[in-house]
Image (tube, grey):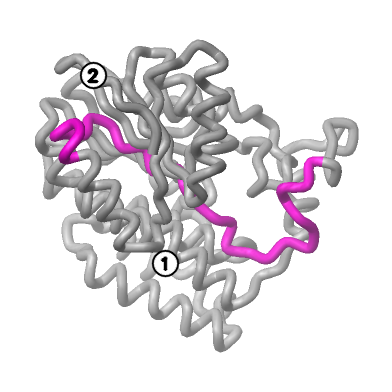
Amino acid sequence: MEGTTPNPPNTRIAVVTGGNKGIGLEVCRQLAGNGVSVILTAIDEKTGAAAVEKLKGLGLSDVLSHQLDIRDASSIARLADFLKTRFGKLDILVNNAAVGGVEYFQDPVDGSVTSEEMFSGMDRDERLEWLWRNCRETYDAAKEGLEVNYYGTKHVIEAFQPLLQASSDGRIVNVSSDFSLLRFFRNEKLKQELNDVVNLTEERLDELLDMFLEDFKAGAVEARGWPAAFAAYKVAKAALNAYSRILATKQPALRVNCVHPGYVKTDMTIHSGLLTPEEGASNVVKVALLPEGGVTGAFFEEGKEASFVFV
């Protein structure tokens, strides 16, 4: 962790998970540029510190780094303790850290693999088809996808809730995806259950995710009507959407919203996306900085409120 300068009492405090690169780094930059004091988190302390130095080089001094692995309860607890001791509150939590839930045939971090010229003339569907051809679904990757994209994010939210409630305008922004939309579920019962947030419970969400992994292991994803292609990613993000809506109802004083940033050029997409990280992050930051007392329990498609079922 870096930085020791105290913040003015009216400064908004934000935490961004997975903040050392891609969309997360851009969210940190844009929030800091809007006068928010940002805690940039990364699994590796050195990469987090390097990302902060990069932002400081752009003249953004009010950014700190802190280690955070959202799969590690002790790591989450250490950050929560730091926030409580240092600030006594948290105003904005951007849950950006995620994995693809697939195994890639090539190193997605290797920027030499893809280039703009390679995708020239290809539309969204063609780029997604290329991405699908360059990865495969395995049980271990699917399990990790649920552990990170749903459970890891949920555990961060649970640990930071008291800090968010200590804010006069606490808000949670969950970076979701249009892949999370319920139209991808071919089982109507599943679709209706995930959309019925009045009756849906966190315990039932756990049961549904266990069912998905069992069906995945048995090779029955298609037969049971779960989403096809990037199934674990779609299911985890749909569960995160549902949890966000449940939480928004339980905690009406908080703003809890989900955001699809767009199909962005990041390591997760092997840089096949249509938008730059800056453009994708701007869609997230718009929701993070919505006026006080605004909508909660909503889904935003590239900056505009949309349906959890269809876009």
- Name the residue type under label 2: Asn
Label 2 crowd (10 A; few <14 / some 14-19 / many >=20): few
Instruction: Please indicate whether residue 3 sits to the left or right of residue 246 in the image.
Output: right
Q: Which region is colored magenta?
A: 84-111
39 or 46: which is nearer to us? 46
139 or 93: which is nearer to us? 93
Q: Is residue 267 above or below residue 107?
A: above
Splitting the image into 4 quarters, where does residue 289 fall?
top left
Q: Is residue 199 magenta?
A: no
- Provide the residue designation for mark 2: 7
Disc ID at residue 279: none
- Provide the residue designation for mark 1: 188
Instruction: Please indicate whether residue 113 sits to the left or right of residue 225 in the image.
Output: right
Can residue 189 be seen?
yes
Q: Is residue 75 above or below residue 228?
A: above
Of callouts 1 and 2, the N-terminal one: 2
246 or 1: which is nearer to us? 1
